[in-house]
Every structure is written in C-alpha cells, then in structure tokens.
Amino acid sequence: MATENKSIGGVLVEIFDSALSLVKIESRSFIGKISNIIKAKGLGVVLLLAALGPIGVAVVFLLIGFYQVLIALQLPDWGASFVMFAVSLLVAGILAFIGIKRLGAKTDG
C-alpha cells in the first residue's frame, strides 16, 4: 500500500478547495430552486400586488361610506371617528395575527 506524504499546507488547500466546491454546488442548487419557485408563482404574485391598488381605493370608499352612515345615525363627528378608528384597529390586528401565524407555518420543500 503506497502512502502519499503531503504537507499540511497541501492538505489545507485541498480541504479549502473541497469546501469551496461544496458551497458553489449548494448555492447553485438553492438558486435553482428559488428561480423555479419564482417562475412558477411570479405572475400570480405580481397580479396580486397589482390588485392591491384597486382594493385599497375600494376600502377607502367603504370606510367613507361607513363614516357617512354613522353621521346619518346622529352620531357626533368625534364618535364616528372613534368608531372608525376602533374598527380599523380591530381589522389591522386580525390581519396582523393571521399574517404572523402564516409566517410561522411549515412549508413543503
């Protein structure tokens, strides 16, 4: 059995080269997986983000209408504003709670 005598420097260079190759291969694999996900879901995400503008405008008009209803029910301006504040805060809290739960959800892959 032939043994090869290598210096410590040579062995360290081989270890470094092997580690570098492993990092390159893993990063290419990771980038490939991410790009496949983006290609598969990219258009859907873009369309959902584009829908946020009209949805935002619709919500503003809905809130204005709700405010007008509260005023028509003889609620003082400050009372209607407080009700709108409370409803908006409640909706934001519910959405934040759901969002935080979704961020912690397990994903496939």
Image (cartoon, rainbow, N blue to C red):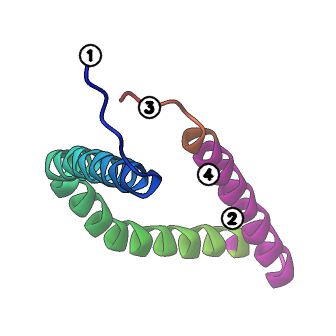
Asked whether, in this view, residue 41 is left or right of residue 93, the answer is left
Q: Nearer the viewer, mark 3 or mark 1?
A: 1
Q: Is residue 49 above or below residue 108?
A: below
Query: Residue 106: horizontal and vertical position, in percent?
Result: 51, 30
Q: Nearer the viewer, mark 2 or mark 4?
A: 4
Separation of marks 2 and 4 at Cα, in angstroms = 11 Å
Label pair 3/1, CB-CB below 8 angstroms = no
What secondary structure is the stretch in magenta mostly built from?
helix
Q: Nearer the viewer, mark 3 or mark 2?
A: 3
Label located before the other in sequence (3 or 4)? 4
Q: Examine the rendering and report whether any part of residue 73 can be seen.
A: no
Which residue is label 4 attached to? Answer: 95
Label pair 3/4, CB-CB below 8 angstroms = no
Q: Nearer the viewer, mark 3 or mark 4?
A: 3
Label 4 crowd (10 A; few <14 / some 14-19 / many >=20): few
| Residue drawn 60% across the image and 39% down it | 104
SS state under label 3: loop
Separation of marks 3 and 2 at Cα, in angstroms = 31 Å
Separation of marks 3 and 4 at Cα, in angstroms = 20 Å
Residue 107's label in the rendered image is 3
Label pair 1/4, CB-CB below 8 angstroms = no
Asked whether, in this view, residue 90 is left or right of residue 49, the answer is right
Label 2 crowd (10 A; few <14 / some 14-19 / many >=20): few
Which portion, as a residue range, is magenta?
72-100
Q: Residue furthest bottom?
A: 77
SS state under label 1: loop
| Residue drawn 36% across the image and 56% down it | 13
